Amino acid sequence: MSKIAIIGECMVELSPASDGHFKMGYGGDTLNTAVYLSRCGGNGDYFTVLGDDAYSQSMLEQWKSEGVGIDKVKIAEGRMPGLYIIDNDEHGERYFNYWRDSAAAKTLIADYPAVFDELADYDIIFLSGITLSLYSEQDVRALFDFLKTYRENGGQVIFDNNYRPRNWGSVERALPVFNEMMSLTDVALLSFDDEKVMYGEHSAEQCIARWSEAGAIEVVLKNGHHGCNHYKEGQTQLIPLPHVLKPIDTTAAGDSFNGGYLAARLAGKPANECIHAGQTCASVVIMHKGAIIDRAISLTEVIN
């Protein structure tokens, strides 16, 4: 089975409870994906930086219990993880409020340059638009230079566009980074909503064309209740949702899709089955509060 490295950040999560209080947990888009990958029968190593505080230690213990690989996690003395609070509207849509300017995860490339030697040993690297927003311009440049060489040496890059405007300050700052990332992506797992926020209103066909012409070999365009558009080798097909649901909380909808998708991909499933696994995983997760649902809720049958 292929080895996958997942790069990103985990934060302390506060999500609203029904009694008006907040429930504390841990979440972050790529970490959520790593957890759901594990719960769906796959495995991957998580690359990030945590602090030497109690919250960071608790995160590590939780990740290990979930089956997420923690051997590559760095510990920065005197640092702490970031924090975010979730708000939900009546439709279950989520909004985030962040406290993360000095989060330890931002230092992965600047303070641990040997991380690229570690990443080179993996068959697949998964990262997101939020991952890119963590780093300085210089760090992103170093990451992109590495990814170019990594792909030339046979590595595969899977990218989720996950665009959060507050992380970037302006779309003008984000666009050059995302545009270059397109040319470094083998498989693009895209939120169509995020694409439209960045590039304005356009069709699914135009979105797929932009990514495929930039160099993406395969594109999965996640489009809510409309299902997914899948592109590969010049062919596009629509894969509808098995069931259209009214979500309780969409916090980790895309992340859990990615987890199910990656688990099926690592198991050697064909593209349509990978997408179906992603849709099935997400359909369970969006019916519960918080980014990472109770472990007692089974996902082990997602890719079977």
Image (cartoon, helix red, strand yellow):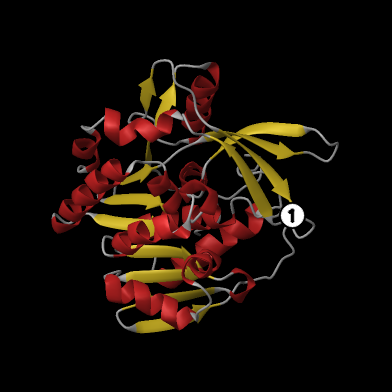
Amino acid type, label 1? Ile
Name the residue: 74% across, 54% down. Answer: 248
Residue 47 visible in the current orientation? yes
Position of 248 with respect to 162 (left or right) is right
Q: Position of residue 116 (x, y in %)?
A: 22, 39
Left or right for 190, reference 99: left
Image x and y of residue 293, in percent: 64, 43
The image quadrant that residue 8 belongs to is: top left
Relative to 3, does residue 246 appear above or below in the rendering?
A: below
The count of marks equals 1
Q: In the image, what residue occupies the spot 28% across and 41% down?
A: 139
Identity of the residue drawn at 41% across and 82% down = 236
Task: Tell whether 237 sits left or right of 180.
Answer: right
The x, y position of residue 217, in whole percent, is 29, 70
- Residue 1 visible in the shown view: no
| Observer-nearest of 59 and 296 | 59
**Label 1 element class:** loop
At a point 22% along the width and 44% down the height, the residue shown is: 142
Q: Is residue 233 above or below residue 7?
A: below
Quadrant assignment, res 232: bottom left
Few, some or many residues within 10 Å of mark 1 (<14, 14–19, 20+): some
In the displayed image of the protein, which residue is found farthest to the right? 19
Which residue carries the number 1 mark?
A: 248
Q: Position of residue 110 (x, y in %)?
A: 28, 32
Q: Name the one closer to the observer, 72 or 130.
A: 130
Q: Is residue 127 above or below residue 175?
A: above
